[in-house]
Image (cartoon, rainbow, N blue to C red):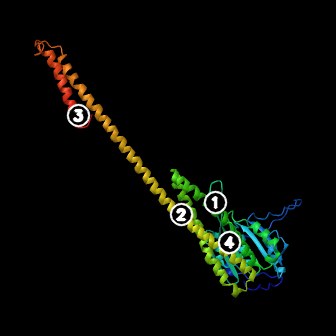
């Protein structure tokens, strides 16, 4: 960081024409009203919910907690050696434009903060750093990873955080820094370090939760759970998002460390930032390993599913073969029993003129014919392995 800018007492910062026009458009004029003769005074307007907390610090100690952005701006102008730390959650366009006009924030950075859904990055606009971070937290109940987005503006005497999402918990970061005034008095860069450290530390429970999910998935794969493919796919998608959150941080922190000498970063703060960089590298490697492991598990699961399907098809084929054999046997015996029934049916017809009725050998001939037909059919079916 460069040295703090001298702030003339009672005067604001310069505003660009772009910011003035947007601020004027975002805040329409309010028509003047004449109060009623006996009307009660109106209660003060409540602070918008997007302003989480604003505080001013001097030498690592909180000296003021303004209730509004206007009070924060006014008190910061009066304190030449102070630092403002403003926290916002899903701010309105008017609030961001007010901050941009007061602290000379670059229009491109302000536009990114308004739109959100940015990739992790670090940009320097003159004396101001603009950092985009993707925080993550593991939700135990649904067993999934929830991602949040955090934008940080770091200037010579201010830090502005714009949070989109539930993570990270910046109140804990503020409490930690206020409990260590020796670190906080190092200025806005120390606050940036604390935010980076909180985001990176927040990855550790996610890594543990994902590792536990992968262990459960491996068990389900070899147990043949039919829903495991869907779980592998969903976790793989989360790991893609996790990679997008962690991998750019490695380059960002190395770029930040490359400017230590140029911007005169405190040596103790340099050590802290190197430690954060080590943790980010370790986390990024773990996430890469998770994605590779999920790809291999998905391949193994597909192989096991194919083997199971082949086994089921083989079992169905064997069952069909056995069923065919039984049908052959039943059909063979039905044909054998049908032959004497046919002969007996013919001789049972009540016609007067039948050749064998007056023949003395007619009955033995009919019985013998039945036997010959049955034996012939039995021999034929036996030779064809139907019986």
Q: Where is residue 244 in the image (x, y as percent from the top left)?
A: 58, 69
The alpha-carbon separation of the residues under discs 1 and 4 comes to 26 Å
User: What secondary structure is found at the residue carrying circle 3?
Assistant: helix
Residue 67: quadrant of the picture: bottom right
Q: Name the residue under label 4.
A: 151
The quadrant where residue 364 appears: top left
Quadrant of the rendering where the C terminus is positioned:
top left
Q: Is mark 4 on a helix, strand or loop?
A: strand
Nearer the observer, disc 4 or disc 2?
Answer: 2
**Residue at label 2?**
293
Marks 1 and 4: which is nearer the front? 1
Using the image as rendered, state which of residue 213 and residue 134 is in the foreground: 213
Residue 261, image x, y percentages: 70, 87
Q: Nearer the viewer, residue 142 or 208?
A: 208
CA neighbours of label 4 inside 10 A, class few (<14), some (14 to 19), many (20+): many
Residue at image mark 3: 381
Front residue of 314 and 199: 314
Q: Name the residue under label 1.
A: 209
Lower sequence index among marks 1 and 4:
4
Which residue is located at x 35 percent, y 41 percent?
A: 320
Residue, x 64% and y 80% (percent of image)? 254
Q: Nearer the viewer, residue 11 or 242?
A: 242
The Cα–Cα distance between marks 3 and 2, rounded to whole angstroms, is 59 Å
Residue 43 position (above or below residue 284): above
Q: Answer above or below: position of 355 versus 92.
A: above
Residue that appears at 50% across and 59% down:
298
x then y, percent, for residue 78: 84, 80
């Amino acid at each position: 960081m460069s040295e703090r800018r001298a702030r003339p007492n009672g005067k604001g910062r310069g505003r660009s024409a772009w910011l003035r026009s947007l601020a004027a458009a975002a805040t329409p004029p309010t028509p003047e009203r004449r109060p009623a003769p006996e009307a009660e005074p109106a209660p003060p307007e409540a602070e918008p919910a997007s302003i989480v907390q604003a505080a001013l610090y001097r030498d690592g100690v909180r000296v003021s907690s303004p209730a509004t952005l206007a009070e924060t701006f006014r008190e910061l102008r009066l304190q030449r050696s102070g630092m403002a730390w403003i926290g916002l959650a899903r701010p309105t366009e008017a609030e961001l434009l007010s901050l941009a006009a007061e602290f000379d924030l670059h229009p491109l950075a302000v536009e990114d903060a308004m739109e959100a859904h940015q990739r992790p990055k670090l940009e320097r606009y003159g004396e101001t750093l603009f950092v985009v971070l993707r925080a993550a937290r593991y939700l135990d109940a649904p067993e999934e990873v929830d991602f949040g987005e955090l934008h940080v503006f770091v200037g010579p005497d201010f830090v502005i955080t714009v949070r989109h999402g539930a993570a990270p918990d910046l109140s804990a970061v503020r409490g930690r820094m206020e409990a260590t005034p020796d670190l906080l008095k190092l200025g806005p860069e120390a606050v940036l370090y604390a935010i980076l450290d909180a985001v990176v530390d927040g990855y550790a429970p996610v890594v543990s939760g994902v590792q536990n999910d992968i262990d459960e998935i491996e068990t389900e794969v070899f147990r043949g759970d039919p829903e495991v493919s869907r779980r592998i796919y969903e976790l793989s998608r989360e790991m893609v998002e996790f990679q997008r959150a962690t991998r750019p941080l490695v380059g960002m922190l190395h770029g930040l460390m490359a400017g230590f000498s140029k911007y005169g970063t405190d040596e103790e703060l340099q050590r802290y930032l190197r430690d954060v960089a080590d943790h980010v590298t370790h986390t990024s490697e773990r996430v890469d390993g998770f994605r590779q492991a999920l790809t291999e598990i998905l391949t193994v699961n597909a192989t096991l599913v194919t083997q199971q399907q082949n086994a089921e098809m083989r079992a169905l084929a064997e069952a069909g073969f056995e069923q065919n054999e039984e049908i052959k046997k039943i059909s063979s015996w039905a044909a054998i029993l049908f032959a004497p029934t046919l002969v007996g049916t013919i001789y049972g017809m009540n016609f007067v003129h039948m050749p064998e009725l007056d023949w003395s050998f007619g009955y033995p001939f009919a019985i013998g014919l039945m036997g010959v037909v049955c034996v012939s059919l039995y021999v034929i079916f036996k030779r064809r392995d139907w019986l």
